[in-house]
Amino acid sequence: MASGKVTFRQERCKGCNLCVSVCPAKIIFLDEDNTNIKGYHPATVTEMDKCIGCANCARICPDSIITVERN
Amino acid sequence: MAKELWKGNEAIAEAAIRAGCRCYFGYPITPQSEIPEYMSLHMPKVGGIFLQSESEVAAINMVYGASGAGARVMTSSSSPGVSLKQEGISYICSAELPAVIVNVMRGGPGLGTIQPAQGDYFQATRGGGHGDYRVIVFAPANIQEVVDLMQDSFELADKYRMPVMMIMDGMIGQMMEPVEWKKPAVKLEDLPAKPWATTGTKGMRAPNVINSLFIDPNASNDHNMRLHAKYQHIIANEQRYETAETEDAELIFVAFGTPARLARAAARLLEEEGIKAGVFRPITIWPYPYDALYEAAAQDSVKAVVTVEMNTGQMIDDVRIAVRGCKPVSFVGQAGGRVPTPQEVAAAARLALGR
Amino acid sequence: MAIVYQKSKGLTDVEFHYCPGCTHGIVHKLVAETLEELNILDNAVGVAPVGCSVFAYNYFNCDMQGAAHGRAPAVATGIKRVLPEHVVFTYQGDGDLAAIGTAEIVHAAMRGEKFTTIFINNAIYGMTGGQMAPTTLVGQRATTAPLGREREHYGSPIRMSEMLATIDGAAYIERVTVTTPANIIKAKRAIKKAFQLQIEGKGFTMIEVLSTCPTNWGLTPVEALEWVKEKMGPFFPLGVFRDITAEEAK
């Protein structure tokens, strides 16, 4: 299976959860230990090794804050 | 150059084409429909664009888009149609786009009449749309003047990036007069560049934005103040008027457009009775030539000022502002399509002089 | 590793003002990606509407004009007639296009104006605070229909794509949505096709996008996507309503 990597421009995240809802690997979550300048808990991934690089999250992100890389 | 006989509305259209206008959007309405008709036939011959829109609202917004894209563009209509254009005129003023708008006025209010009138003076000079804005307004009194002012209209529109309106009563649109084409036709390649226009970045510059939204209160205030400064500059530099026999006159008629011609006829009637009457004719009704009119009215010889209008008294407000109470100001006019006669105008002058 | 997805160069770096989860952002992105991929950013002129997307001129990385409410098709007509070789598009919501600007869009389609309209249908007036739109569903609550839209009072919603598809000047009309990654890919394909047909001079093209308004619907962004599928979908079916190329191929 392809391996991927996602990076979030967290200061621009609005915590809408759409990326979370479409991640097939279910690895994206809103980081409640973190709050960005807008006051939202930004989307994040800790188990990056499970990312398949499908780009579902980036495709649905309304604020274009996600960059996806893949092997 | 030899004079040619032209119908007013057709002369307007031809003059615009000669002034480099290559884009016309409009909707038919009496008594100006010969303008779009003429444009539909002749604009394509010079590679220009004629488009009959679905409404005056659409037409003025097409003007907005075309002007923003860098074209020399105009629209025309008559009173009820110009009411519909007011929204667009407000936006065009705020977005600072050049355009020429012709109003061949008919009687109102409402559907009114198709006969000539001057009931849109307030609309033209006070801004019929929302917000603090002004448009330069020319009020030609004959077809020759319409033709002469057309090129100036487009030039001023470009210079100040704002609409220039030309208003005339339906009489001027419908009558025929000899016209001399005094100025050579404008060459498009001589027109100044418009680096602000949305013509595609071509990868050479940051995107251009044409817009009238300034949501930040400070930005909105700054924008309005900048427009205000522009309007003040225009007030100081662009007033035009004509006087006839006003020096040492006993009475001064003030009139724009066709009534100025009637006032001249009335002055001649009064002259036969030994009354010296002059005519002060603003050519720009915005900016209004207040100081020049004051100087004429303040002469010791002047006993009364009479405005002659084809409405129920609109310009009289500006005349009162100009005269500043130094002389009595009265009104004579007919509205709703009737044109005052020189005899009626002369009678009003006698009344004003207490004779 | 290679980048497989990143923010389009068709967007400026200005942050969107949209509410969290609003699908305007997704559609902006699809338009921007299309302009970038077709290599027409340098040559494009967009027209922003009045409504939630009033600031669209700040977001698209190309020349833009802001139009009066509903007048974007007239403004775009003026632009395209002056610049026939340029790519022109309008971006309009349902209040703009289906209410105050109905005449302008119908007549632009009738004339076969060669620009592309992106029509955002979210069944509500977003910017002004959740008032009823012409596309508000019967029974759907709005701040000017507090008990829900009543058919007897306001009639049934208007289906703009179906209506405009009856007009000869329209070259391509499709209704899409952006509720899933798969639907987003389909929406992008539709938008791209519309721009391509514009470039080929085929006529007026419009892509209607069923969109969300989580804020005024009173739903979370994820619930709002479900609402599009469940409530809007049956009344506003997805699909191609007019495709001049398919007719030409026959």
Image (cartoon, coloured by chain):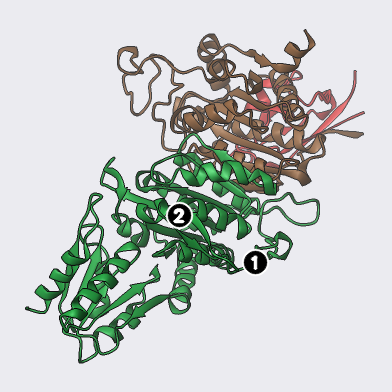
Q: Residues within 10 Å of mark 1 (few under 14, many from 20)?
A: few
| CA separation in Å, label 2 and label 1 | 19 Å
Say which residue appears at 66% left-offset and 26% top-offset.
C205
Which chain shows up in green? B
Q: Count the marks: how many? A: 2
Quarter the N terminus of chain C occupies: top right
- Identify the residue under disc 1: B184
Percent of width and height locating residue B151 = 56, 64
Amino acid type of the residue tagged 1 in the rendering: Pro
Amino acid type of the residue tagged 2 in the rendering: Gly
Say which residue appears at 55% left-offset and 12% top-offset.
C233
Camera-nearest residue between B278 and A28: B278
The answer to whether A35 appears left or right of A52 in the picture is left
Q: Is residue C154 above or below residue A68?
A: above
Percent of width and height locating residue B140 = 41, 64
- Identify the residue under disc 2: B8
Say which residue appears at 66% left-offset and 59% top-offset.
B196
Which chain shows up in brown? C
Tell me which corner region of the image, top left, top right, bottom left or bottom right, holds residue B99.
bottom right
Q: Chain A: give its colour.
A: red
Q: Is residue B167 above or below residue B347?
A: above
| SS class, disc 2 | helix
Say which residue appears at 65% left-offset and 27% top-offset.
C204
- Of callouts 2 and 1, which one flags the residue occurring earlier in the amino acid sequence? 2
The residue at the far left in this view is B354
The answer to whether B317 appears left or right of B328 in the picture is right
